[in-house]
Amino acid sequence: MRFRHGRTSRPGRAWRKGHGLLIIPLAIIAAVTMIDINSPTTIHLGPFLVAAPAITASFAGAVLTGAIGALAVTAQVVIGLLHGGLMTPNHQAQIAALVVISVLVTLFRYVRDRRERQLGQVRSVAFATQQVLMRPLPGRIGPLRIASVYIAAEAEAEIGGDLYAAVPAPGATRLVIGDVRGKGLPAIDEAALLVGAFRGSAYRDLPLPGIAAHLGNSVYWNIVHLADGEPESQESFVTALVLDIHHDAPALSMVTCGHPPPLLLRDDTVRTLDASEPALPLGLSATSAGEYKVETFGFEPGDLLLLYTDGVIEARDRTGTFYPLTDRVAVWDGSGPQSLVRHLHDDLLRYAGGRLGDDAAMIAITRCR
């Protein structure tokens, strides 16, 4: 399942959506013109015509704003011709002021439309990148049903340093979920590197400790040889969780590298799968398979496993209180992975006031009965 921020509408679409609102500036122009013409020559309502292009700019593009501005100027000319004379200083000043304001409003709207188009292009590129890097997990792998969700903290980027992926392993489905320290392009680069290394290792049939060492050394090598001396890259590391969910046994095997522990839902109870000997985050140094210990836990048919990144549990409400993930999962009354991640996605954003301070990813997995 994929959630992303909405894209900015194009100016043409904005006109189609808001063309019904044109009655407002048109009514202003018509009303001001008729009232001014039928009022004594000492009363001048022409300055109110500036409201027409100003209001139009709030819902329409630059072309339509300019057209309404031109119509307002034309109305002011008509008022001058029929109400005291076009060449009077008062009417000339009103016409000049209306022309200047209409041009400025149209120019500001043009600049805003251009910026929105640029942001739309950035979002399109970011979404395409996300589709490649954060390829949606399949809804079904063997006996497993899976649902995933990614929430980027940077609204314009739609992607950050959290990552997840799944590949086949002998008699199992192998998954990784991780969180790169930091934000922005360096974090995205590290995430892309780790996901690529994980997917590329699928054909090698490495055991879990070997996979963890391979991923850690890939990150460390990238930091040492490709960081180009950037301070953010030199200080980078990745917390990660690598696990095999066995198809032929009601169990899962897991290696924890400084990552938050998964939650296991079974019979209306929530259990935290804490590792007895968690390893350090990936990328801090070169490593070997012997430095990683495999933990094994039961995973029965009907159980529901929740993997997540620290962006979930570090989300805060207005009082600064962290999101109580375990408590929120415990009171959830739905069923199935899709229902759980959708519930947590909506609940997390409500709790944090609609915006997260860090990227967040969640994966829910169940074994079919």
Image (cartoon, rainbow, N blue to C red):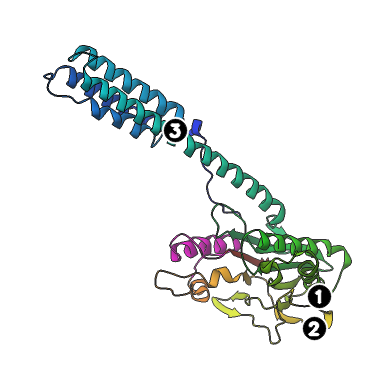
Q: Residue furthest front?
A: 89
Q: Are marks 2 and 1 in contact (CB under 8 Å)?
A: yes
Identify the residue at image location x=83%, y=75%.
210
Nearest the viewer among 285 and 82 is 82
Which residues make up the magenta segment? 332-358
Q: For mark 1, what is the residue?
A: 213
Does residue 369 show up?
A: no
Tell me the quarter of the image containing the N terminus.
bottom right
Nearest the viewer among 97 and 38 is 97
Tell me the quarter of the image containing the C terminus.
bottom right
Residue 154: image location, x then y, percent: 55, 57
Q: For mark 2, what is the residue?
A: 291
Nearest the viewer among 238 and 347 is 238
Q: Whole-Å distance between the Cαs marked 2 and 1?
A: 8 Å
Q: Whole-Å distance between the Cαs marked 3 and 2?
A: 63 Å
Asked if residue 117 is among those painted magenta in the image, a careful observer would answer: no
Residue 160: image location, x then y, percent: 62, 60
Identify the residue at image location x=35%, y=28%.
100
Q: Whole-Å distance between the Cαs marked 3 and 1?
A: 57 Å
